[in-house]
Amino acid sequence: MKKVIHIGLPELTGEELIEVGELAQEAVMEHIFKYLTRSEVKDIEVTARINREDTLDLELEVYLEVPIFVKVNVNALVNEAIENAYKKVEKRLMEIAGENKAQKISK
């Protein structure tokens, strides 16, 4: 499952972009493992891609495979995990924007 969110924020440093991507990946994993144990997950892969052009686009791709005996709606869980990640990323980007604005004012 793949989703793209258009954020459209001012310039971010390379370090901030990496931080945002890692935050998104960690948020997805945390959400999934809040509902499943490690033994219930056969395979999981979370990929974050960030594109900077006119807007800042974050693309999350999540592959989750569970054994047949695990009773979970994988699509719903992945959707929830992605939404959770976007909320955390959005919050962090607002913090970064606030920090950048504060730095400009203090200069």
Image: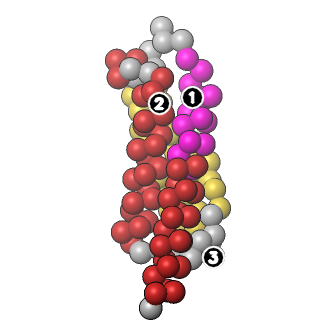
Is 35 rendered above or below residue 46? above
Residue segment shown in magenta: 72-86
Amino acid type at circle 3 is: Asp
Where does the C terminus fall, quadrant-wise? bottom left
Viewer-side label of 3, 2? 2
Outermost residue toward the bottom in this view: 107
Query: Of helix, strand and loop, which one carries label 1?
Result: helix
Instruction: Locate residue 27, reporting x and y percent.
Output: 46, 43
Nearest to N terminus: mark 1 or mark 2: 2
Q: Which residue is mark 2?
A: 32
The single residue placed furthest to the top in the displayed view is: 69
Tell me where residue 17 appears, x and y as whole percent.
43, 66
Residue at (47%, 40%) from the top-left corner?
28
10 Å crowding of disc 1: few (<14), some (14-19), many (20+): some
Task: Mark 1 and mark 2 in contact? Answer it, CB < 8 Å.
Answer: yes
Residue at the spot x=62%, y=64% of the render? 7
| Callout 2 secondary element | helix
Pointer 1 residue: 77
Q: CA distance from mark 1 to mark 2?
A: 7 Å
Q: Secondary structure at mark 3?
A: loop
Question: Residue 85 in magenta?
Answer: yes
Q: Residues under labels 3 and 2: Cα distance?
A: 32 Å
Q: Amino acid at mark 1?
A: Leu
Which mark is drawn over residue 54?
A: 3
